[in-house]
Image (cartoon, rainbow, N blue to C red):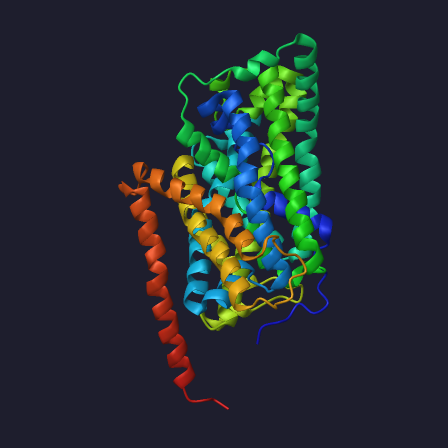
Amino acid sequence: MSQRPGAARKLLLLPLIAATYFMVSGGPFGLEDLIGRAGYTIALLLLLAVPLVWSLPTSLMIGELASSIPCEGGFYAWVRRALGPFWGFQEAWLSLAASVFDMAIYPRIFVDYLSHIQPAWTSGHRGVLWALAIVVLCAAWNLRGAYSVGSGSVWFFALLLAPFAVMSALGLWYGIHAHSLGLLTQRAPATDLTGALLFALWNYMGWDNASTVAQEVEDPQRNYPLAMLAAAALVAVTYILPLAAVALVRIPADRFTSGAWADAAQVIGGPWLALGVSLGGLLTGVGMFNALSMSYTRLPFAMAEDGLLPHIFTRRFANGAPWVSILFCAAAWALALQFTFERLITMDLVLYGLSLILEFVALVVLRIREPDMPRPFRVRGGLPGVIAVGAGPTALIVWAIFVSRAERFAGISALLFACLVAAGGSVLYVIARLALLTNDNLPSSN
């Protein structure tokens, strides 16, 4: 039998906001390639526009569904209730498949910034060993339960953003007094708008991840909508202010590649600020991997409770941590640590985008099928309103899927590879249903 969390401590609003922040952002780390590909003006415009057509509609959708159906498994439970078990399984499969590519990114960020502190520590095979250490550390941390992960996220949030607050203040002060506002118009030598928009979308995705721990959140009907809106505002501010600061200090846009924030901090505030930003990069890698581990590992647990995965995945500690699922997912994520950054983002965005479209469809279907369902928070405008909310994100996802055909992955088109991965969900569902039917027909041991 699975152990219910019982008296396990639940996530309060502030830890939920911090955990959501790390599931989406983790600070300005990850913006380097956006700046390098588009220059400052286009990057700023994208960071201002994308939240309006991507983050805000997604947050509104999650606010309604998470407050109406606060179940463990989150978006899997929403899609299953709206569209049935087949599509619920596909939702979970797409999210877990995307996680294999997504979770390999954050140990890489840790290694990139550790190399800025001491390059010899990450040379050769040492970088892979550090990445594996992050996987092990976060798996162990998650075994302590959601409350521990949420509390850690609050401290990580404060510590990693402290040097960026100093850097932003110094850069903006310099820009105002040196009258260098015109530098914001500086463009990258070779502007890549397609790549820049893909990076912007990636830096703003993941809002639904916090929903999977609904049973471990205090008063989810109230706290989920507040957490979504607060985290969306925090992400936008902590992206835009540091970017504006480095633009005003005359740092060329083409110098921005992965790990470049430490170099920018060196120019703005000297070696101590550079060290602080590098340490912040380490915290980002750990904080994002840790928070997302909490999210993704609830999916196998919820699927196992529905009989779609082996019953062993329902095993929990008394603190609510699904320990079998945590260990299984950590092992899977460790296998993807060697993929390149750009390929990881492409695969992650395509698979995640497909799962997000299913969530918007669930939002509409539930409004039609269950109009009287209690909705502590609801999207305004009735049925036309919920359809309109999903229009912007869906259009961006379709565009991202279309342009991904130019990327190569495992020797074939990234789009074709993603489609093959997605199609695997249908095969696995048939296998899961056959296994469930077989188990139901087995003679009882009682």
Q: Quadrant of the N terminus?
A: bottom right
Whether 155 is drawn above or below 146: the answer is above
* Horizontal relation, residue 173 to residue 394: left or right: right
* Horizontal relation, residue 26 to residue 15: left or right: left
Say which residue appears at 58% left-offset and 66% top-offset: 371
Q: Is residue 393 visible?
A: yes
x then y, percent, for residue 413: 28, 42
x then y, percent, for residue 153: 66, 45
Name of the residue lying farthest toward the bottom: 446
Whether 239 is drawn above or below 1: the answer is above
* Horizontal relation, residue 80 to residue 435: left or right: right
Say which residue appears at 70% left-offset and 10% top-offset: 177
x then y, percent, for residue 47: 55, 31
Q: Quadrant of residue 110?
A: top right
Whether 440 is drawn above or below 199: the answer is below
Name of the residue lying farthest toward the top: 178
x then y, percent, for residue 91: 45, 59
Query: Which residue is nearer to you in this view: 3 or 408?
Result: 408
Q: Is residue 118 visible?
A: no
Name of the residue lying farthest toward the left: 411
Say which residue appears at 47% left-offset and 57% top-offset: 361
Whether 321 is drawn above or below 275: the answer is below
Query: Which residue is nearer to you in this view: 388 or 412?
Result: 388
The number of callouts visible is 0
Query: Which residue is nearer to you in this view: 360 or 96?
Result: 360
Q: Quadrant of residue 250?
A: top right
